[in-house]
Image (cartoon, rainbow, N blue to C red):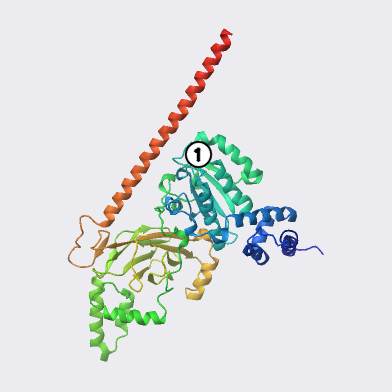
Amino acid sequence: MAENPAQNKAKLISETRRRFEAEFVSDKSEKYDPRDVERLQQDDTWVESYLHWRHNVVDDTLKMIDESFQWRKEFSVNDLNESSIPRWLLEVGAIYLHGYDKEGNKLFWIRVKYHIKDQKTIMDKKKLTAFWLERYAKRENGKPVTVIFDLSESGLNSMDLDFVRFIINCFKVYYPKYLSKIVIFDMPWIMNAAFKIVKTWLGPEAVNLLKFTSKSEVQEYVSVEYLPPHMGGTDPFKYSYPPLVDDDFQTPLCENGPVASEDESSSREDVESDGKETLETVSNEEHMALLKKVNPTESSSKAEENEKVDSKMKAFKKPLSVFKGPLLHISPAEELYFGSTESGEKKTLIVLTNVTKNVVAFKVRTTAPEKYRVKPSNSSCDPGASVDIVVSPHGGLTVSAQDRFLIMAAEMEQSPGTGPAELTQFWKEVPRNKVVEHRLTCHTVETSKPNTLTLKDSAPNVSDKTSEDIYLQLNHLLESNRKLEDQLQRCIWFQQLLLALTTLLLASVVTFFYSLYN
C-alpha cells in the first residue's frame, strides 16, 4: 500500500533528524549552538521548512542545515536582542517589520536610502537583519514574509551588493520557506545592472518572486492602508524607536477589564478620587439600566447617585476627530490625549462605531501592557451601534509619547455568539487578510486639546503653544533637513557621474587622434 503524504513527510523528517545526528553531530563538534540541535529534534515545522526548500532531497537538506546552523552560531542568533544592536541603527529605521500584504503576509521593510555602504558597520547591519528575522520566526513559526526594497530617494552609494547578497542568503539558507516575494519599489535606472547580478544569486525559482513596481503598480501587492504616502498609500505610520515597532503590540494588562483583586482596588481608587476624576467607565446604556432597576424605597439614594453620574458625564471629553475605516469608525482618529496628574484627567476614551451590517469583533492591544487598563479590550460591536472604550494608566504609571495602541477589527459574518469563548475561537480562525488594523499614539497634555469637546456650556481653553506643537515643528524641520541632505547627495552623485562620463569621452578623443597621427 502506498504511503500517504503525511506518512511520507513524517518519514523524511525522521530520516533527516537521524542522519544529521549521526553524520554531523556525532563527533561532538563545536560548530553548532546546542539549542539549535535540540530544536531540530523537537520542531517538525523547522525540519519541514528545510526539506521543502530542498525539494525533499535529504542529502541537500542536511548540507543546508549544516550551513545554516554554523551561521546561527557565528552570529549568536539565539542571543540577539536590542542591546546587541547599536542604538543608532535601531533609531534610523532602515529595517523593520510593519503591516501586511494583500495575502496577509507580514511586510519586511528595507529602506535603502538609509543604508550607506560602509565596511565598518556592515556586520552590525547584518545582525540587525538577523535580529528582526529571528524575532519574527520565533513568534510566527513558518509564516512567510514579503520583503519590500524601498529604493525611493536612494542612489549608488546606497547600493551594497554584499549586504543584498546576505539578505538573499537569509531566505535561501538561513530562513527557508519564509519568503513570499520581494517587491522592488521605485528602482533607479542606474541600478539595473546591479539587480541583474542579484537575479543570478536568487536562482530561477526565486527570480519569479521578484516584483518590480512603481507607485501605480505596488498596490497590486499591498493595499493603501499599509503603504506610506510616498508610495501612494494612506498609512500614517512613522517609524520611531523606542519601543520596537507595531509587531510588538501585546494584549493589555487586563483583558476585558481588570481581574477581581484589581477591580476591588480600582473601586477604592475611584471612590477616593471621586471629586477629582472627570472620566467614568459607566456608559449611557449602563446608566439607563440602573434607572430601570431602582426600587421605590431606594429611589432617593439612587437618584443622588445618578445625579453624580450625570454631572460626570457632562464633564466627559468626547473625541472629535474620526478615522473612517471599512468596518469601524474610530474616534479619535490618530492620538489619545491623557491629562497630566495635576490636571486630574488620568483616563481617555476611544469610541468605536460599527458601520457594517454584521457584528464586528474587536481587540485593543498596546506596546506597553504593563502601563494601561483597557475596558473592554476584547469584545464586539453590533451593527450601527457604538462602544466606548476607557483607557487608563495603571498604578500611577506615566504615559509616554512612545506608547501606541492597536485596534484590530474583523467582521463576524456568521456569528455563533459573542461571548468570551466564541470570540477566542473566532480570533483563532479568522484569516489575517480579513483583519483591519488601526493605530493610535499617546500624548500627555496640560490643557484641553482642540480635537476634543467638553460637554459643558463653556468652551475649553487651549494654549497657544503646546509641547506637541513644538515636537511637530522639530520633526518637520528634521524632515526638511533630511530632504535637503538627500537632494544635495543626489547632486553630488550626478556630478560624479557626469565627471566620469566626461573623462571617458576625453580619453576616447585623445585615443582617436593618437591613432590617427600614428
| Residue extending farthest top | 517
Q: Nearer the viewer, residue 160 or 273?
A: 160
Left or right, residue 404 beside residue 202 = left
The answer to whether one can see residue 108 in this image is yes
On-image quarter of the C terminus: top right
Q: Position of residue 334 (x, y in %)?
A: 35, 58
Circle 1 packing at 10 Å, graded few (<14), some (14-19), many (20+), is some
Q: Is residue 39 above or below residue 146?
A: below
**Residue 270 found in image quarter:** bottom left
Residue at the image position 29 percent from the left and 89 percent from the top: 295
Q: Where is residue 515 in the image (x, y as percent from the top left)?
A: 58, 11
Residue at the image position 56 percent from the left and 41 percent from the top: 161
> SS at mark 1?
loop
Residue at the image position 55 percent from the left and 12 percent from the top: 514
Count of labels shown?
1
Left or right, residue 398 beside residue 459 = right
The answer to whether one can see residue 104 in this image is no
On-image quarter of the N terminus: bottom right
The residue that label 1 is drawn on is 187
Q: Is residue 355 above or below residue 375?
A: above
Q: Which of 258 and 456 is in front in this view?
A: 258
Q: Position of residue 3 (x, y in %)?
A: 78, 63
